[in-house]
Image (cartoon, helix red, strand yellow):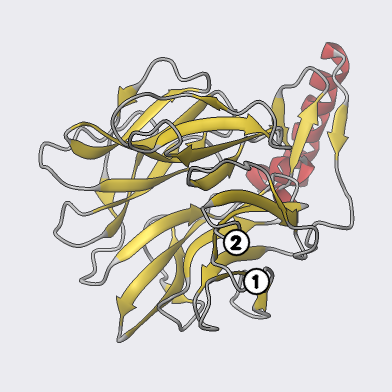
Amino acid sequence: MKLKQKSLYTILVCILSLTGFTLLINTTAQAPRQAQIAFDSYRDENRDVFVMDSDGKNQINLTNNPALDWGPAWSPNGEKIAFASNRDGNSEIYVMDADGNNQRNLTNNPADDDAPAWSPDGRKIAFQTDRDKILDQIYVMDADGENQHNLTNGFLNAAPSWSPDGQRITFASDRDLSLDIFIMDADGKNLRNLTNDPNIVTNGSPAWSPDGQKIAFESFRDRNYEIYVMDADGENQQNLTKSPAEELEPAWSPDNRKIAFSVYEREGVGGIYIMDVDGKNLRKLTNDYTDVRPAWFDPVFTSAVLSDDKFMTTWAWIKHISE
């Protein structure tokens, strides 16, 4: 096994050397030092963004603001968390340090902006907005809030999620009557319906797996919300939760082995749960039904950027797949 790991390291070093790429790994102390899950909760009679260890311990309120804050999204290096807030009178995209400091407005627009999603290289944020005076559309902006522009037009388009290579975005849209899961190129071209649900039902909250092979999503096709997973091309759609409870908003663990999700009622209570990617080994992390929209970060699997702007994972990922 050690020989196999050494061979993988050697191959990667040779590739980097031959192509002239420089690996840049950000190890700033601002990022959490262990795996954490961000989520939002109304447990303190106000919706705020919280963070906890991936085992459910050490739950901390990060935003502590009298307004409503929700929908956290980790930056790829773990230094920042983007989220939505109505503290300026309408829903805006904010960003803060991972410890809750330096909260600031990125969008500064009178429309409602929601559902931020970082690009894998950390340079852009996709989000949904109603600023075009029609149903929500997918926009993208630089991570500092500059260069906000539209990727979709017409119909409802919401809940963006980037592919791990940054080349595509998956999202929910009702352009084919049913609310289905679509993908498009990162520039908004080549839209394609993945779920193609023949019934008029809701499929939403898509989340691309870290290895790029799967997309998890929520679906109402069984007459209650369940967590489904499918291949990235839309094939092999399967129900993972198979429960009478309402399960929504899946989020992959960075090691590709687990999925966190929101449960609005299960065994009498709701909260954040996790399970293996095959639906087994279900485990409850929180006990409040207002705990929703989990987002996972693990410093072992932080992102690295190559000097030609290509994206890859760090040494830890290479070590993980060799085991």
Q: Residue at x 77, y 65 (%)?
A: 99
Marks 2 and 1 sit apart, C-alpha to C-alpha, by: 8 Å
| Mark 1: few/some/many CA within 10 Å (<14, 14-19, 20+) | some
Q: Residue at x 41, y 25 (%)?
A: 152
Q: Amino acid at mark 2?
A: Arg
Query: In the image shown, does 123 or 7 lie closer to the viewer?
Result: 123
The residue identified by callout 2 is 87
Query: In the image shown, does 113 or 165 lie closer to the viewer?
Result: 113
Q: Amino acid at mark 1?
A: Asn
Mark seen at residue 278: none
The residue identified by callout 1 is 65
Q: Left or right: 103 with respect to 94?
A: right
Q: Position of residue 320 (x, y in %)?
A: 67, 48
Badge 1 marks a residue whose secondary structure is loop
Marks 2 and 1 in Cβ contact (< 8 Å): yes
Q: Residue at x 59, y 57 (%)?
A: 296
Where 113 sits versus 248, above or below? Answer: above
Closer to the observer: label 2 or label 1? 2
Q: Position of residue 121 (x, y in %)?
A: 70, 33
Where 283 sits versus 116, above or below? Answer: below
Q: Position of residue 166 (x, y in %)?
A: 59, 28
Dividing the picture into quadrants, the one containing residue 222 is: bottom left
Q: Position of residue 79 (x, y in %)?
A: 78, 52
